[in-house]
Image: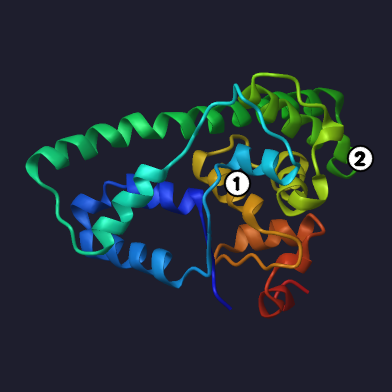
Amino acid sequence: MWPVGTFLNVFELSQTRNWLEKKERVRSASKALLIESRELRMDNPLARIAGLSGLYFVEADDYACEDRFEFLQMMAGGAEFTPKGLGMFLGRIQERKQGLKEAVKTLSGHIRTTRRIGKTLGVKANRVQMEVTRSLIALWLSGWARQIVPVEQIDWSRIELFMHVLHEFVFGASVKSEAATNDLVDMLNMLYVAPGEFYWTREISWNKRIVESGMGKYLVPDILADYG
């Protein structure tokens, strides 16, 4: 079973300060991503949703990472920082994080608002219709596209793992009071898992949440068996 690399994997590996502190470990991880991945899915999370739905938006923000991919290729091949290159890298860490950071911040804000409404109304997780979560995703996508994206235009069958886990994350019994950036990045990686594929993680909380969301079919059978 060969893994699939994603935009978020490249983004995280190319931005980490561990290139300064744990260089060989990150270099090894970068080699594994670039060489062992049977496929690299390099569209950003929002473009992923749009593309799978056959949508294209001229005014959408371009969170691309071609330069980060080239950086990983060079570093995985043994390149070292020059003094000038190190300064540029440190500057880029802050600069290039901003686009994804803003997208995550927006989604996190939508989640907090939706949770507050649910708490005020005393709504239980199992009583919340999936349409609420679909509207949440469509709202987030609309902000990126800079135009209204109707719920009906999104192909929900192509992102069902992400949709159901997000629903559980927002409304489930084991939700956190605040969504951390790492939580959202982990969840956004699920956008790259197509129907019929498996999602693998060591984190028990995510495996449990996937099962609770009704999406256990996306877990590797041996892992799924641990959750009854």
Residue identifier under label 2: 127
Q: Which residue is drawn at 87% across and 35% down?
A: 131
Quadrant of res 61: top right
**Image spot of residue 211 (x, y percent):** 76, 62
Quadrant of res 39: bottom right
Above-or-below relation of 51 to 141: below
Q: What colour scheme governs how the chains and residues are painted in the rendered image of this protein?
A: rainbow
Task: Tell me: 160 left or right of 100.
Answer: right
The residue sitting at the left extreme is: 83
Q: Which of 167 and 139 is in front in this view?
A: 139
Q: Which residue is drawn at 32% across and 47% down?
A: 16
| Inter-mark Cα distance, 1 to 2 | 24 Å
In the picture, the quarter occupied by the C terminus is bottom right
**Mark 2, secondary structure of its residue:** helix
Q: Tell me, for residue 214, which label it has, or none.
A: none
**Mark 1, secondary structure of its residue:** helix
Residue identifier under label 1: 188
Circle 1 packing at 10 Å, graded few (<14), some (14-19), many (20+), is many
**Image spot of residue 146 (x, y percent):** 64, 19
**Image spot of residue 88 (x, y percent):** 20, 35
**Image spot of residue 158 (x, y percent):** 76, 51
Q: Which residue is drawn at 27% across and 46% down?
A: 17
